[in-house]
Image (cartoon, helix red, strand yellow):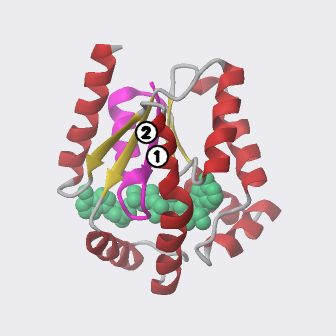
C-alpha cells in the first residue's frame, strides 16, 4: 500500500506510521527523521536544515524533493510505503504526484490524523522533556502550528478532492488510533 499520513505537529503521524509498519511490512519514510539524521551526521544539508527546523519553518521544497526522490527510488519501496511528513505544502503534493506518476505508483490512501490542539500542546511538552528535540520549544511549536495551518492543512483538501482522504480521530491511546487507521485501510483494500 502507498499511504500518506497527514496531521499537525504532535498529532501522532510518526507514532502511527511506526505501528503501521509492523502490520503492513512496508517502509516508513519520515522526512523529519531524514532531516534529523542528516543534522546528526553533520552533513552540510543537515546543518542547513537544522537552522530552519529549529525555527519551525519548512525546509525548501527543492531540498525535500531531491531527498524524497532518492528515497522513493530505492528497491525496498516496491511493495509500498508509509510517507510521514511529506508532502507538507501544495507544491510538494504536486511534485510527489509527478514523481509517483513517473514510477507508475500513485498514492492510494491519505490519512489525516485529527487531534484537539490542547492535546497537541500537552503531547509536545511531554516529548520535550523525554527527547532532546531542538524544535520542541514553546516558541518553535507555536510557529510549527502556524505553518501547519497556513501551508500543510490545504494538502488534506488536495487529497480530498481526489477522493483519497480519510479523517481519523487521533485522540485516545496509540493502539486505539492505530486500530482506527487499520480499519480504514482494510475497508479501502476490500473495496479496491
Ligand atoms: P516531523 O518530524 O514530521 O515532526 P512532527 O510534525 O512533530 O511529527 P512527529 O511525527 O515527530 O510527532 P508525532 O506526531 O508522531 O517534522 C519536524 C520538522 O522537520 C518540521 O517542523 C519541518 O521543519 C521539517 N520538515 C519535515 N518534513 C518536511 C517537509 N516535507 N518539508 C519541509 N520541511 C519538513 O508525535 C508527537 C508526540 O506525541 C510523541 O511524543 C508521541 O509519543 C506522542 N503521541 C503520539 N500519539 C499519542 C497518543 N495517541 N496519545 C498520547 N501521546 C501520543
Question: Which residue sits at x=65%, y=37%?
Answer: 96
Front one among 35 and 132: 35
The N terminus: image quadrant: top left
Front one among 111 and 126: 111
Is 106 positioned to the left or the right of 115 in the image? right
**Residue 128 sits above or below residue 42 on the image:** below
The C terminus: image quadrant: top left
Mark 2 sits on what residue? 160
Q: Callout 2: few (<14), some (14-19), or many (20+) C-alpha neighbours within 10 Å?
A: some
Residue farthest along the right direction in this orientation: 44
Quarter holding ligand 1: bottom left
Mark 1 sits on what residue? 157
Query: In the figure, residue 165 lies in which quadrant?
Result: top left
Cβ of mark 2 under 8 Å from ligand 1: the answer is no
The label on residue 21 is none
Q: Is residue 189 visible?
A: yes
Q: Callout 1: few (<14), some (14-19), or many (20+) C-alpha neighbours within 10 Å?
A: some
Residue 63 x, y percent position in the rendering? 76, 53
Question: Which residue sits at x=73%, y=63%?
Answer: 46
Is 8 positioned to the left or the right of 45 in the image? left
How many discs mark residues in the rendered view?
Answer: 2
Is 56 positioned to the left or the right of 161 in the image? right
Mark 2 touching mark 1, by CB under 8 A?
yes
Mark 2 element type: helix
Residue 8 x, y percent position in the rendering? 42, 61
Taking the magenta stretch, the answer to whether it contains residue 18 is yes
Taking the magenta stretch, the answer to whether it contains residue 113 is no
Residue 54 x, y percent position in the rendering? 61, 76
Residue farthest along the front direction in this orientation: 161
Question: Which residue sits at x=52%, y=49%?
Answer: 155
Q: From which residue to which does the magenta span run?
A: 1-26
Amino acid at each position: 500500500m502507498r499511504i500518506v499520513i497527514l496531521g499537525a505537529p504532535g498529532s501522532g503521524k510518526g507514532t502511527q506510521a511506526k505501528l503501521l509498519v509492523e502490520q503492513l511490512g512496508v517502509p516508513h519514510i519520515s522526512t523529519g527523521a531524514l532531516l534529523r539524521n542528516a543534522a546528526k551526521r553533520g552533513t552540510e544539508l543537515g546543518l542547513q536544515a537544522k537552522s530552519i527546523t529549529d525555527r519551525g519553518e519548512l525546509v525548501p521544497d527543492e531540498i525535500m524533493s531531491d531527498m524524497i526522490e532518492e528515497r522513493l527510488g530505492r528497491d525496498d519501496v516496491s511493495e509500498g510505503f508509509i510517507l510521514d511528513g511529506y508532502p507538507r505544502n501544495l507544491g510538494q503534493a504536486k511534485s510527489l504526484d509527478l514523481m509517483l506518476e513517473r514510477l507508475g505508483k500513485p498514492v492510494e490512501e491519505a490519512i489525516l490524523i485529527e487531534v484537539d490542539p490542547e492535546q497537541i500542546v500537552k503531547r509536545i511538552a511531554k516529548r520535550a522533556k523525554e527527547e532532546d528535540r531542538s524544535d520542541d520549544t514553546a516558541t518553535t511549536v507555536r510557529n510549527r502550528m502556524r505553518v501547519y495551518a497556513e501551508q500543510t492543512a490545504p494538502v488534506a483538501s488536495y487529497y480530498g478532492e481526489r477522493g483519497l482522504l480519510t479523517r481519523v480521530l487521533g485522540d485516545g491511546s496509540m493502539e486505539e488510533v492505530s486500530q482506527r487507521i487499520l480499519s480504514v485501510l482494510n475497508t479501502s483494500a476490500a473495496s479496491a
